[in-house]
Amino acid sequence: MALRQAHAVGEVVGVVRRPEAVAEAIEMGAVDRATMNGPAAVAEADVVVLATPVRTIIRQIAELGPHMRPGTVLTDMGSTKRAICQAMEALPRGVQPVGSHPMCGKERSGIAAAEPGLFRDRIWVVSPLDRSSPEAVQTVEALGRIVGSRIIHLDPARHDQLVAAVSHLPYLLSCGLVATVDALGQYDPEVWTVAASGFRDTSRLAASDVRMMLDILLTNREAVLAMVERFEADIRALADRLRHGDEAGLAVRLEQIRGIRQEHSPR
Amino acid sequence: MALRQAHAVGEVVGVVRRPEAVAEAIEMGAVDRATMNGPAAVAEADVVVLATPVRTIIRQIAELGPHMRPGTVLTDMGSTKRAICQAMEALPRGVQPVGSHPMCGKERSGIAAAEPGLFRDRIWVVSPLDRSSPEAVQTVEALGRIVGSRIIHLDPARHDQLVAAVSHLPYLLSCGLVATVDALGQYDPEVWTVAASGFRDTSRLAASDVRMMLDILLTNREAVLAMVERFEADIRALADRLRHGDEAGLAVRLEQIRGIRQEHSPR
């Protein structure tokens, strides 16, 4: 939708699962035409963009790859990169794969949630493979720039570790918070009445699409679990200072943390 | 500022610490006049509203109480209620204390961050004491309603337990998250580049005023630590399912949590 609005591409062909989605996608202006036939669609494409949950992307790479012409650029919108780029290595010679990940999630999913401005002023991570041609990498970078994103390059393992910290850990914290409040809510439902903006923001990610998140967690398990462990140590260090009444130590640490947050995420 | 804009009160007298704040508060339209002399200001007040950090409120109750006339209604904006309502019990007979807590924090503090619309459509918790007269309670409820809040009554211990879950725990999670990301950032600063909206929302509370939060944590220590412990068990239960590759169990639990979040915090 964003690329079409920018008049940056020729024909956009959508591959959908539900028959109704053919008309929905056209009506929304997301595509020029849509089909449920993936192999036929990719066979005539110059650029293929896989924008499904991570494990579906991996399956589609294997299923659709053999139908692509030599020179076709294949990229993806997946939130983890190691497993996807590994699957891309097995593509037929000639297909030009480049991993990518625009950092712009939202909780709503499906065509109706599509939003052409979603990519504007966001970071778009590009993870080239050794086999990616410079031209293919430039094509994927151009897609990102046209929709308003800033391109950075990260190798897949590094990408996955960084997003484990800033994206997958926050999701699990958000879910854990909802679970904790819900347990209290079982015997005092008024807890939901007093839940204010602080709770809403901190728990927002718990509303994310589960299928999408499950694929992310399962394809980035080690990095995510390592971050949960680090977090557990960090929260325990804060709680211990509170438990021991170490007011001075707690104040210093909370001010440090506040300064770090202000420095890196001013808003 | 909100009460003045609603033309709901007579003269509003601000008690400030910094000499410059006298002019600032008048200029912003927050007060009719301002003074640094608390005892003199409360001696002529019909209603006194203490809006400082919790332990300052507790000190001010003791310091200012003896200067108030019989019948003066004393309330507060403190984020914990047990310690404050306990301090209110010791006020001179005749003074009419009523604990209260409008659920509307923001990260910025100080006069410049004042915002008359802050209370609109928010929950305002009123915690009457045994000694509070019905008229005093009604006065405090009226303050809340005039500025657009919805009044609910909670006894202090119950209030403190509920906000430990929906407000103080989220603050500590937010701080822990920033600490974890910062530790990674020490050897890979690019982590801050990929920190997107999910991180920003989940870490927003870490930017809260530390002095205010420290007083809250220290006057609600047991309830906060109990919530941290519950949370640790909840996050561990999620991480364990991931660790053991229990995809079905993880999916079911994450969908439950998503449903709970959607039900109670739609947005």
Image (cartoon, coloured by chain):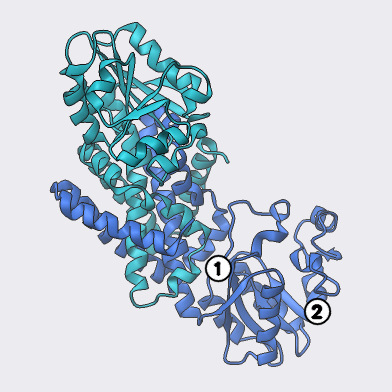
Chain colours: A blue, B cyan
Q: Earlier in the sequence, mark 2 or mark 1?
A: 2
In the rendering, which numbered label is found on residue B186? none
Amino acid on which disc 1 is placed:
Ser
Q: Residues within 10 Å of mark 2 (few under 14, many from 20)?
A: some
Chain for numbered disc 2: A
Q: Give residue A192's position: percent from left, percent from top.
A: 44, 32
Residue A219 is at least partly visible in this image: no
Q: Nearer the viewer, residue A89 or B247?
A: A89
Q: Secondary structure at mark 1?
A: loop
Q: Residue at x 35, y 29 (%)?
A: B34
Is B67 situated left or right of B207 in this image?
left
Is residue A185 visible in this depiction of the protein? Answer: yes
From the image, tell me which residue sits under label 2.
A45
Task: Depth check: give the residue in front, B53 or A160.
Answer: B53
Q: Is residue B267 above or below residue A94?
A: above
Write down the chain letter for disc 1.
A
Query: Of helix, strand and loop, which one carries label 2?
Result: loop
